Amino acid sequence: MKDSHLVKYILGIADNALILGQRLGELCGHGPTLETDIALTNMSLDLLGQTRNYYQYVAKISGDDSTEDDIAFLRTERQYLNVLLVEQPNQHFGYVIARQFYFDVFHYLLLEKLQASTDENLAAIAKKSIKEVSYHQRFSSDWIKRLGDGTSESHNKIQTAINDLWAYTDELFEVTEDDSHIVNIGIGVDVSELKAEYYSKVSEVLKESTLEIPDNKYFKKGGKIGIHSEHMGYILADLQYMQRTYPKMKW
């Protein structure tokens, strides 16, 4: 019998990786330089690889005949549990980097704690994934510094992106009912306990980058319970097209 709390907890983590990986995949061939283009594409592949590990585990414990492909491609918008941050569009390179930076700092802190999970499968995925996410965090942090402490144009563009996307960061630390259940039995991570360290690390990088720390107190939420932004439907239209057009297709 499946544990619905555990399934939703894992989907919350996996869907973040899937949707951000999809967003980064949109940039393949469109990076500002060849090196950066390849780096972003590889990061997308890292996230999609992590997603597969989570979805394979969900398929195993779901108690039905679902596969990783079914979980990825055949759910409706409200069934995805990713945070709003990762579905925000690639407006320009500054937004790509700011979104990545905000998520990477959180992702690393999460995986660092998840390695101690009493669920051996989740602990193993975390131990494997944190090596990749460590690189992601270095990459995005370095670009924040390069853009923030670069030209006046790069500084202004990354500052705008930092300001606009700040409103999506607090949702990273929201604990749902399913999360709470899994935390209480020793499997999950209480993300609310990561909040102080997260904002400390983010602020440290922003200060080093000569960027201002946003002071707005209004935050946008909803993704973790399936209520998404207007961008999510377009992402899924691209992501799910082939599987829905040609059901049961296999590569």
Image (spheres, grey):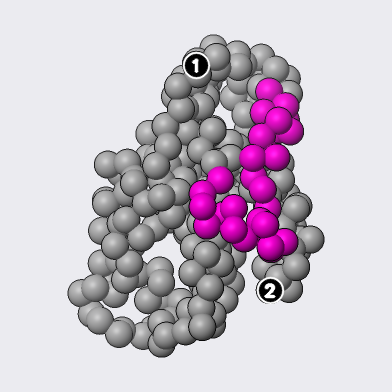
Label for residue 121? 2
Which residue reaches farthest left? 245
Q: Is residue 61 above or below residue 222?
A: below
Is 183 part of what is drawn in magenta? yes
Residue 247 in the image: above or below residue 240: below
Residue stretch rendered in magenta on the structure = 175-203
Q: Residue sitting at 49 percent across and 69 percent down?
A: 4
Residue at image x 58%, y 72%? 53
Magenta residue check for 41: no
- Real-space Cα separation, disc 2 to disc 1, in angstroms: 39 Å
The answer to whether one can see residue 32 in this image is no
Q: Amino acid at mark 2?
A: Asn
Q: Residue at x 72, y 58 (%)?
A: 114
- Residue placed most toward the observer, 197 or 5: 5
What SS does tag 1 mark?
Answer: loop
Q: Taking the image as drawn, is residue 102 in sight?
A: yes
Q: Residue at x 54, y 41 (%)?
A: 174
Q: Nearer the viewer, residue 28 or 74?
A: 74
Q: Quadrant of the C terminus?
A: bottom left
Q: Which residue is mark 1?
A: 216
Is residue 187 shown above or below 204? below
Q: Position of residue 120 (x, y in %)?
A: 73, 73
